[in-house]
Amino acid sequence: MRHLLPLLIALPLALPACARDGDPANDQAAQVAAVDAALIGNTAASAGDPALTAALRDQIMVDPALVQQANDDVVRPPTAPLSGAMPPDGVAVAAMKSDPLAGEKLRPAPPAAAGSCRQCAIARRALTLGALAQAQGGATGQCAARVTYSAGWANRLPAATPLFPDARVAEAAGADGDGCALRVVSFVSAQPMQRLLDFYYTRTTAAGFDAQHQAEGVEHVLAGTKTGGGAFLAMMRPHAAGGTDVDLMVDAH
């Protein structure tokens, strides 16, 4: 009996220790610790793989030249506030110092004919390019009801009445098909008005147009028709910042 008593006392003390050794939580913690040790190279497994050990211990290498290309498609805020400022209108005109027609021989347009300028009055009343064309009446006026607006029409002018070389197009319209070949372009040039009058007079008369020059105040009109069909109208006035405003209309049907 004296020999059994110490065993009975020691048994309860050993049971908790056995329970701790078989605890699943303790087993999982031991496995995690073993993986961590392997990753940092403290075990024989990692020590046997020098490439893995070097990859884990070495510093990350970064190419400074490629840093700015990371996340290239990410939307970022601008580096500076966006500016909606427009350059003064006279800047582009003043910057045009060279003659776009240098070397081209032009015939001087005749002086404006005496009398009233009907087209000048029409231009003052017309609020749109379509209205300007419609006021011409006849086939041109009928085609004016079909015009569409697009800057692309400025690139489709006939060879006899091209866009002036330094033209800055403000608006363009036109109509094609069903007997219509109408082009109407509004633009500004840095050149003085007489230079544009001479240019269009030279080009249109060479193509067979009978060009006439009229004026009223500061407004000038060069217009004409051609045997076999076709008409043009170039309305000009001084631009506020220098140069010349031009409304060019051509009916090539």
Image (cartoon, grey):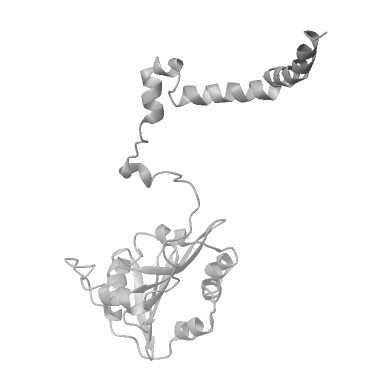
**Residue at point 37% right, 84% down?**
240
Against 93, residue 226 (above or below) is above
159 lies above or below 191: above
Q: Is residue 69 left or right of residue 39?
A: left
The quarter of the picture where residue 6 lies is top right
Q: Residue reaching furthest left?
A: 103
Q: Name the outermost residue toward the right.
A: 1
Q: Quadrant of the N terminus?
A: top right
Tell me how many marks there are: 0
Q: Nearer the viewer, residue 161 or 206?
A: 161
Image point (45%, 27%), residue name: 40
Give coordinates of residue 238: x percent, y percent.
35, 83
Quadrant in which residue 109 is drawn: bottom left
Nearest the camera: 104 or 32? 32
Q: Residue at x 34, y 63 (%)?
A: 160
x and y percent of residue 250 in the render?
Answer: 44, 66
Where residue 56 appears, x then y in whole percent?
41, 28
**Is 104 left, or right, of 174 in this rendering?**
left
Give the percent coordinates (x, y) of residue 73: 48, 46
Q: Is residue 149 visible?
A: yes
Can see residue 185?
no
Foreground pick, 138 / 27: 27
Q: Is residue 44 left or right of residue 98?
A: right
Depth check: give the residue in front, 222 or 93.
93
